[in-house]
């Protein structure tokens, strides 16, 4: 069954106040078209989970600058002075996690678990006594899984039933987010019939994908993203 949807209808499924994961590692893998449509539709009070905030004026930064994001869960925002200012002014709540920890929290949610134990950050100021657990003579920090209601994903290639192939560093977070969200919306500039991929080349199976938005072309926002069709 084809999962193709228009850009407008796919994003209209997201209500105000939703928790939304956004794929990408800097520019690579960031679903700029999906984000731009979310900006246009104007849903507010969003909690966004993304590795970074992109740079000022494009990508996730546009959504934040437009006042639609209540909370950002991320690893760093150092490339975006505007977002830093919003955080410092108290206009944007930001929760930071080490990059590997954020990935594992998302992966754990996708695996259907509630959390995991780690010794990372035990002695840091972000760890309180309520986060610690004694087990077999050792002290561990309890890290809770991080699920979301929605995920916005950019795939280099896809087929009609939702099998996805990513390119480059886009693979860092996108496969994890596709598993950890209840409703997964994908954009791709290269959509074809099932059977175009060998099973071992599929990064995200179609079972995790709900909607696919075909893109006619990639705009300049996508920057370093250059897709090459596998022959």
Image (cartoon, helix red, strand yellow):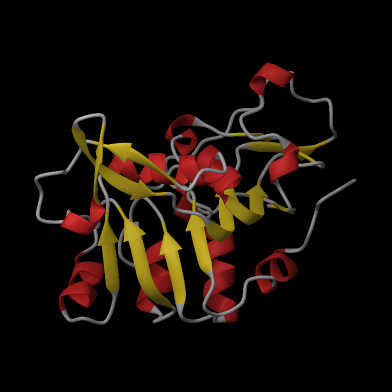
Is any part of residue 191 visible from this angle? Answer: yes
Front-lying residue, 180 or 15: 180
- Asked if residue 142 is positioned above or below residue 227 in the image, the reply reads below
Q: Position of residue 231 (x, y in %)?
A: 71, 18
Is any part of residue 128 visible from this angle? Answer: no
Count of number-bearing discs? 0
Q: Position of residue 182 (x, y in %)?
A: 64, 56
Residue visible at 32% across and 38% down in the picture: 117
Residue visible at 59% across and 53% down in the picture: 181
The quarter of the picture where the N terminus appears is top right
- Asked if residue 155 is positioned above or below residue 212 in the image, the reply reads above
Q: Is residue 193 left or right of residue 109?
A: right
Front-lying residue, 19 or 66: 19
Query: Can you tell which quarter of the image residue 130 is in?
Result: bottom left
Residue visible at 64% across and 35% down in the picture: 204
Residue found farthest to the right: 1
Front-lying residue, 198 or 205: 205
Residue visible at 46% across and 55% down in the picture: 221
Q: Position of residue 215 (x, y in %)?
A: 68, 52
Front-lying residue, 227 or 174: 174
Q: Position of residue 102 (x, y in %)?
A: 35, 46
Residue found farthest to the front: 136
């Amino acid at each position: 069954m084809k999962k193709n949807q228009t850009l407008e209808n796919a994003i209209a499924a997201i209500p105000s106040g939703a928790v939304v994961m956004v794929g990408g590692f800097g520019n690579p893998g960031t679903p700029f078209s999906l984000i731009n449509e979310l900006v246009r539709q104007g849903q507010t009070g969003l909690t966004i989970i993304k590795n970074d905030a992109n740079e000022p004026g494009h990508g996730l930064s546009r959504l934040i600058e437009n006042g639609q994001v209540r909370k950002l869960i991320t690893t760093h925002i150092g490339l975006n002075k505007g977002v830093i200012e919003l955080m410092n002014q108290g206009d944007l709540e930001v929760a930071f996690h080490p990059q590997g920890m954020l990935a594992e929290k998302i992966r754990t949610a996708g695996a259907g678990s509630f959390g995991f134990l780690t010794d990372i950050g035990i002695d840091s100021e972000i760890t309180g006594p309520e986060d610690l657990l004694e087990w077999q003579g050792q002290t561990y920090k309890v890290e809770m899984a991080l699920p979301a209601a929605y995920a916005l994903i950019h795939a280099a290639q896809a087929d009609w039933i939702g099998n996805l192939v990513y390119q480059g560093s886009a693979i860092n977070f996108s496969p994890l987010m596709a598993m950890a969200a209840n409703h997964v919306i994908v954009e791709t500039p290269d959509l074809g019939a099932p059977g175009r991929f060998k099973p071992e080349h599929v990064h995200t199976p179609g079972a995790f994908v709900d909607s696919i938005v075909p893109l006619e072309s990639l705009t300049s926002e996508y920057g370093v993203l250059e897709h090459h069709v596998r022959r």
